[in-house]
Amino acid sequence: MFFIIFFLILFASVAYCCWHIWVVLPVARFIKILVMVGCIGSLLMLFLTLAPWLDEWPMKVSSIIYEVGTTSLIVLLYLTLTFLVLDLGRLLHIVPKTWLVHNVWTSLALVIGMGCLLAFGNIQYHHKVRQPLSLLTDKVLRKDMKFVLVSDLHLGYHNRGQELERWVSLLNKERADAILIAGDIVDRSIRPLLADSMAATFRKLNAPVYACLGNHEYYAGEPDAQQFYIDAGIHLLRDSAVLLKDGVLLVGRDDRTNKRRKPLKAILPQPDSAHYTILLEHQPYHLEEAEHAGIDFQFSGHTHHGQVWPISWITDATYEKSFGSHQRGNTHYYISSGLGIWGAKIRIGTRSEYIVAEVKRR
């Protein structure tokens, strides 16, 4: 049902924007046809990003298809919003009808405005925010501990090896006790990760890496993703737990895409009152489960905080908490908007981030 509604809205938006573009452009019919072909062709590339044969084409071609196709979705969103505002203004007699019919200034404003918006969004995406987080506990720790928390790297046809190298350098500066990844390391295919030797890049991290699976590991092929984790030296916590030498218990759940994953209480039959417990759970649904299981801190991702406004409003309405710090009872949560991103490397009204969490004794 979700996909049916999504595609109905998508096709309606395409028809609505194409009609407006046709009417507003002050150019010859032949040029308008070329513009329509370009617009629709760009959106068709969005569907090609879902096709299995994307992995069979040359890497450069596949990357261009991915970048153009997913960026066109962002352009469609903001063109639709722009034309809706202009139409509303026209109905309220605020916007003259001449602004929307064969108008060179409106056409230029749309092109320049959209270009500036995409440039701003791309700059926002590449700016990685360092978010400090202090977690206090009365439980016994051998020492105060420092963790770097990241989620949703989405390495693939858009986030390539050079980008991962930059992220590794950024995270290594923190000199953490461990790096925790809350799923979606892989985007849609393992192929670009192998082509760019990203497993070797992960091994440059100067701290042990622990991670759980996300839904995109299943989209990319869970066995291939699991093998990549092994090659990259990433400790996969899949409905399992590990006790670190300094007294912190790490728990990782399989993604809820796997309907047969274990309940959280089956991984931790009894609340652990002796050790500070951190849960890695990719999708932040049913936050009460961690509270009832006696988890001290849950780290999740998945939402991306909508990536762009106003989609962030939808994620805020969908999840109990779609971004930032949260608390239920004695359990603390942090829902990350992600270090990487799905699709176009555009963030508007959201941010790319990594979290530096310090677990301290009171």
Image (spheres, rainbow, N blue to C red):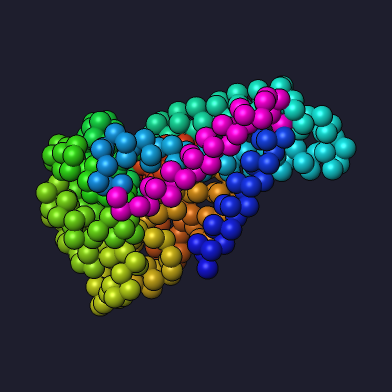
Q: Is residue 63 left or right of residue 112?
A: left
Q: Residue at x 57, y 52 (%)?
A: 10
Kindly indicate the quadrant of the structure image that contains residue 27.
Answer: top right
Q: Nearer the viewer, residue 343 or 278?
A: 343
Q: Is residue 160 visible?
A: yes
Q: Is residue 137 magenta?
A: no
Kindly indicate the quadrant of the structure image that contains residue 79.
Answer: top right
Can you name the residue that lies furthest to the front here?
Answer: 30
Compared with residue 32, is residue 144 higher up or lower down, i.e. above or below?
below
Where is residue 321 drawn, in percent x and y? 49, 57
Compared with residue 261, is residue 298 higher up or lower down, i.e. above or below?
above
Where is residue 167 drawn, in percent x and y? 28, 35
Kindly indicate the quadrant of the structure image that contains residue 70.
Answer: top left
Stretch in magenta: 24-53
Where is residue 96 drawn, in percent x and y? 84, 31
> What secondary structure characterizes most of the magenta part?
helix
Q: Is residue 50 magenta?
A: yes
Compared with residue 229, is residue 2 higher up or lower down, i.e. above or below?
below
Q: Residue at x 64, y 42 (%)?
A: 17
Q: Nearer the viewer, residue 151 or 310?
A: 310
Q: Is residue 131 visible?
A: no
Can you name the residue that lies furthest to the right here?
Answer: 93
Q: Residue at x 66, y 35 (%)?
A: 21
Q: How many marks?
A: 0
Q: Nearer the viewer, residue 6 or 227?
A: 6
Q: Residue at x 25, y 46 (%)?
A: 56
Where is residue 156 drawn, in percent x and y? 29, 43
